[in-house]
Amino acid sequence: MTFKQFKQNRFVRIIGNKYFIILLFFVIWMMFFDENSYLNHRELNMEIDKLEDANEYFENQIERDSKDIKNLKDPDSLEKFAREEYKMKKINEEIFIIEYDTLEE
């Protein structure tokens, strides 16, 4: 195959076209080297997904805590909460904490 025949090949003509080379350079530049490249966008999208998951988690926590606060406005449930969580007691009252051994032999 001579150089002239090689140059007439359709694939070589497309690859050797100056517009194709400029387009290829532009695409590579935009994909990898530009400030707004695909790689940067992918990293930012992953970070956005993580933040949205964290936001959803904290919204659920706020909703749960709001329900707890609403329940604690009742004096009976407030007393129950204080006794269970903080081991509080009334004056002249004894508390026995029973711990179960979960290890089975």
Image (tube, rainbow, N blue to C red):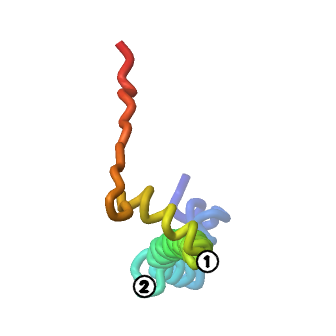
The residue sitting at 56% across, 82% down in the picture is 23
Image position of 19 (left or right of 37): right
Disc 1 crowd, CA 10 A, few/some/many (<14, 14-19, 20+): few
Residue at 55% x, 52% y is 1
| Quadrant location, the C terminus | top left
Q: Specify whether residue 52 is in view.
A: no
Task: Report whether 6 appears left or right of 32.
Answer: right
Residue at point 57% right, 68% down? 76
Hey, which quadrant is residue 16 in on the image?
Answer: bottom right
Foreground: 70 or 8? 70
Please name the amino acid that badge 2 sits on.
Answer: Asp
Query: Which structural element holds mark 1?
Result: helix
Residue that numbered label 1 is attached to: 70
Measured as percent of width and height from the top left, residue 69 is found at: 55, 76
| Residue for badge 2 | 34
Q: Position of residue 40 (x, y in %)?
A: 45, 77
- Looking at the image, can residue 90 be seen? yes
- State whether residue 26 is above or below residue 4: below
Which of the 4 image quarters holds residue 15? bottom right
Which residue sits furthest right? Answer: 10
* Of the image marks 2 and 1, the number of the one nearer the N terminus: 2
Q: Which residue is drawn at 59% across and 69% down?
A: 64
